[in-house]
Image (tube, rainbow, N blue to C red):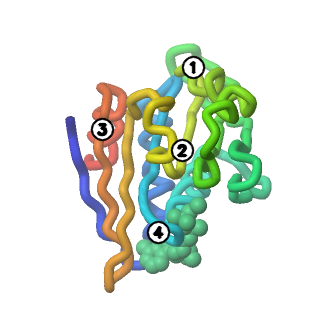
Amino acid sequence: RLTLHRHCTDEASTIELGAALAQAMVRCELPGLLITLRGDLGAGKTTLVRAILRGLGVTGRIKSPSYALVEPYAIERKSLKLKGTLQTNAYHIDLYRFSDPNEWDDAGLRELLDGRSLCLVEWPERAPALLPQADLDITLNPSPQGREIDLQSGSPVGAAMLHQLAS
Ligand code: ADP
Ligand code: MG
């Protein structure tokens, strides 16, 4: 299990970290990936998710999924192995308002977390029994000088991403 710490002094540096995470995903040619993001309201979870999606080429509006639980995005990824472009999905999931386990299947979350898509999940602690082990778990804490951000891998692909990020 690898951990990496980043100190982000302002919003721009949080966005830079998100872009670097997207680059690490592209370089690792990751298939499915579950990334969980922890931290209080205003910690910067959505800011980081937006930056990751932008880094993966999403150009349209990226709204916070609080009410819908899930916002889907189509992303294109270049695959060196397949010598072409892969169409995959990314899902921005916010469980802040999640309380009823029935909602899980109603919102289709079981299918989304099938390991083939990129899932970025805010407030994972609201559904501890339902979420699989994350590849990467990110915790954001406000500090007087911005945000302290801890990244922890939970799988070999997550560890590979952190290696990319650190190099
Ligand atoms: P969350 O999704 O965790 O509730 P948001 O991303 O919606 O948080 O909001 C985070 C707020 O904190 C935004 O106003 C953003 O500009 C600001 N912010 C993000 N990163 C930093 C940082 N490193 N230092 C200071 N402010 C930040
Ligand atoms: Mg948010």
Q: Quadrant of ligand 2?
A: bottom right
Residue at (52% x, 68% y) in the render: 41
Name the residue type under label 1. Answer: Asp
16 and 117: which is toward the camera? 117
Sequence-wise, the earlier of marks 1 and 2 is: 1
**Residue marked by disc 3:** 153
The answer for how far apart the CA atoms under marks 3 and 1 are is: 19 Å
Residue 152: x and y in percent read: 29, 44
Residue at label 4? 43
Q: Quadrant of the N terminus?
A: top left
Query: Which residue appears at 52% of the width and 23% of the height?
Result: 31
* Mark 2 crowdedness (10 Å alpha carbons): few <14, some 14-19, many ≥20: many
Residue 43 seen in the current view: yes
Q: Residue at x 61, y 33 (%)?
A: 101
Query: Of circles 2 and 3, which is in front?
Result: 2
Q: CA distance from mark 1 to mark 2?
A: 14 Å
Discs 2, 4 touching: Cβ within 8 Å: no
Q: Which kind of residue does numbered mark 4 sit on?
A: Ala
Q: Which residue is mark 1?
A: 114
Residue 13, by quadrant, is bottom left
Mark 2 highlights which residue?
121
In this rendering, would 122 be left or right of 9?
A: right
**Kind of residue sitting beneath label 2:** Val
- Dot 2 or dot 4: first in sequence order is 4
